[in-house]
Image (spheres, grey):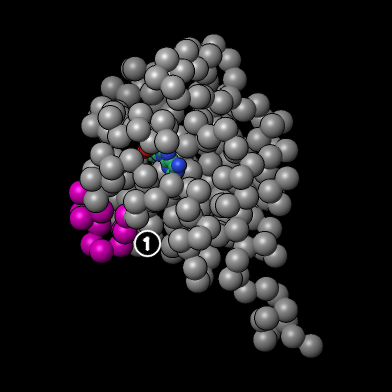
Amino acid sequence: MPFADYFDRRSGRFARFYRSRPIARVLGRGALFDRLDFAVERSTALGALRVVDIGCGSGPLFRPLAARGVHVSGIEPAAGMVELAEQAAADCDGLVDVTSIGWEQLGEWHTGEPFDVAIALGVFDYVPNAGDLLATMGDIARHSIASFPRPGLRTNLRKIRYGARGVSVHGYSRERIGSLARASGMDTIELAPLGRAGYILLARNEPHRVRGARQPADDPATRP
Ligand SMILES: C[S@@+](CC[C@H](N)C(=O)[O-])C[C@H]1O[C@@H](n2cnc3c(N)ncnc32)[C@H](O)[C@@H]1O
């Protein structure tokens, strides 16, 4: 699992990017905050009460979501990140839990009521099988929020930097994100740019494929 190993070794360094918004902007990492803001604002606007944060890292989403009364389940396979995420969760009034698994185990791990939103920030960058991760999100949650790096010089430089450590990086055009979402049965609500870094998707997942979701036919109010 070279992608998780990479972040395990760099957990502290990556977490420090979130210490200061202004410094992150100066260093060209402002998109880290833009994608957090998008995920928090859109989840709140949807009235979400339960979200799953896939590849939660050190847990930068925990406090802003918990402060709005949202219960967060963070999943994360890198031990160094799990440790930081558990520290962040301890500050969230019991609204956050952290489980040490990767997205590949998510479908099996999650049983019962679907989440309101599945969020994956900074994860599709490293996943070769993007369609499989989107399909998993579509199985377990009513909505999905995901960030994607765009192809170009910036992503090519990351491919070289990460590639030297055995980690592959993938860029996505708007068109590719749209077609991946459609193929996973998602309706795109919004596909917004994240500056020059990439895009962020908000999609409604096909209700019939969300496991455990109440279908209109189950609703006494709509039964003939
Ligand atoms: C770029 S970091 C982003 C962390 C966090 N979402 C954020 O926005 O700060 C990517 C995270 O994905 C995690 N990861 C690695 N392999 C994964 C997998 N198979 N499933 C889920 N997350 C994974 C890494 O350990 C790392 O914490």
> Is 143 placed above or below 190 here?
below
Residue at figure coordinates x 58%, y 15% from the top left: 152
Q: Is residue 218 magenta?
A: no
Q: How many marks?
A: 1
Query: Magenta segment range?
Result: 87-98
> Is 127 placed above or below 215 here?
above
In percent of width and height, residue 139 lies at 60, 58
Quadrant observed for ligand 1 in the rendered image: top left
Residue highlighted by disc 1: 71
**Residue that extends furthest to the right in the rendered view of this protein:** 224
> Is 189 placed above or below 161 here?
below
Q: Quadrant location of the N terminus? A: top left
Please say whether residue 129 is visible from this viewpoint. yes
Q: Is residue 151 left or right of residue 55?
A: right
In percent of width and height, residue 193 lies at 57, 30
Residue type highlighted by circle 1: His
Q: Is residue 102 left or right of residue 181?
A: left
